[in-house]
């Protein structure tokens, strides 16, 4: 259920990069709000600004100008330590290439964010087991990424993203390295998480994947070309 409170607010956000002797404007005045419990798909051709947008939303980069408020906090006013804390406490990340640590087991990969949050080892292990069960991998806790299928690796990545119980999940092409059937399973899982109250912001170039989201944002040349805000 989509709530009435905006968890993400962008006001005239611009992002400019210096490329040699030229300034390239990756975002050219973006204004949008994402409500709590919404599920957004960000789409657009290569160079449209969608990846820059996700980096800014995930506090991995800062706007050149404009305002970005995350959970009511003005991101531009935060120092690096405070920004890292915001990411750690409020955001979970799911990537196309999974970004699992090859030397660690499934359980250890899921536990990793909790280590940085200062959890006791016993509590972190219990949380990891709970989340592995939640994504259907309770019997794979001792396996390493190389021993898992692509779909299983993405499930581990989702479990890890949920470890800190974030309100918002950022997903960058979460089905991009998966076959169609496995991609549907991952989207089913993201849909379940959204129904449980998680706000999800996903970048995808696949229209059938984007159709699974309740809202769509189409970008071109660093601007919002159109938005479709649907069911909630």
Image (tube, rainbow, N blue to C red):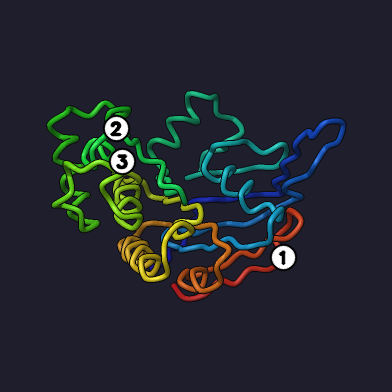
Q: Is residue 219 left or right of residue 160?
A: right
Seen in the picture, residue 163 relative to 122 is either above or below; the reply is below
Reading the image, the residue beneath label 2 is 103
Q: Position of residue 158 (x, y in %)?
A: 34, 51
Residue at horizontal 15 percent and vertical 52 percent from the top = 138
Secondary structure at numbered mark 2: loop
Nearer-the-camera pick, 2 or 144: 144
Q: CA distance from mark 1 to mark 2?
A: 43 Å
Q: CA distance from mark 3 to mark 1?
A: 34 Å
Label 2 and label 3: CA atoms lie apart by: 22 Å
Residue 51 place in picture, x, y as percent = 61, 49
Provide the residue designation for mark 1. Answer: 225
Q: For mark 3, what is the residue?
A: 164
Asked whether the beta carbons under mark 1 and mark 2 sit within 8 Å of each other, the answer is no
Relative depth, front residue between 117 and 134: 134
- Secondary structure beneath disc 3? loop
32, above or below 110, in the image: below
Q: Earlier in the sequence, mark 3 or mark 1?
A: 3
Instruction: Determine the residue positioned at 32% across, 50% down.
Output: 153
């Amino acid at each position: 259920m989509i709530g009435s409170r905006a968890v993400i607010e962008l006001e005239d956000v611009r992002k400019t990069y210096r490329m040699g002797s030229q300034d390239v404007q990756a975002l050219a005045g973006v204004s949008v709000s994402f409500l709590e419990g919404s599920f957004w798909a960000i789409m657009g051709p290569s160079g449209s600004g969608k990846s820059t947008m996700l980096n800014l939303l995930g506090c991995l980069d800062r706007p050149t100008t404009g305002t970005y408020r995350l959970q009511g906090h003005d991101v531009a006013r935060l120092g690096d330590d405070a920004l890292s804390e915001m990411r750690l406490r409020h955001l979970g990340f799911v990537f196309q290439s999974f970004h699992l640590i090859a030397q660690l087991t499934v359980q250890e990969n899921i536990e990793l964010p909790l280590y940085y949050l200062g959890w006791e080892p016993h509590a972190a292990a219990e949380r990891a087991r709970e989340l592995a069960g939640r994504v259907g991998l309770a019997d794979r806790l001792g396996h390493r990424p190389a021993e898992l299928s692509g779909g299983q690796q993405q499930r581990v990545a989702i479990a890890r993203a949920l470890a800190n119980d974030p309100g918002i999940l950022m997903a960058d092409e979460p089905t991009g390295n998966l076959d169609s059937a496995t991609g549907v399973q991952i989207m089913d899982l993201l849909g379940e998480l959204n129904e449980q109250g998680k706000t999800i912001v996903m970048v995808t170039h696949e229209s059938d994947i984007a159709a699974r989201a309740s809202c769509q944002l189409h970008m071109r040349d660093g601007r919002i070309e159109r938005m479709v805000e649907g069911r909630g």
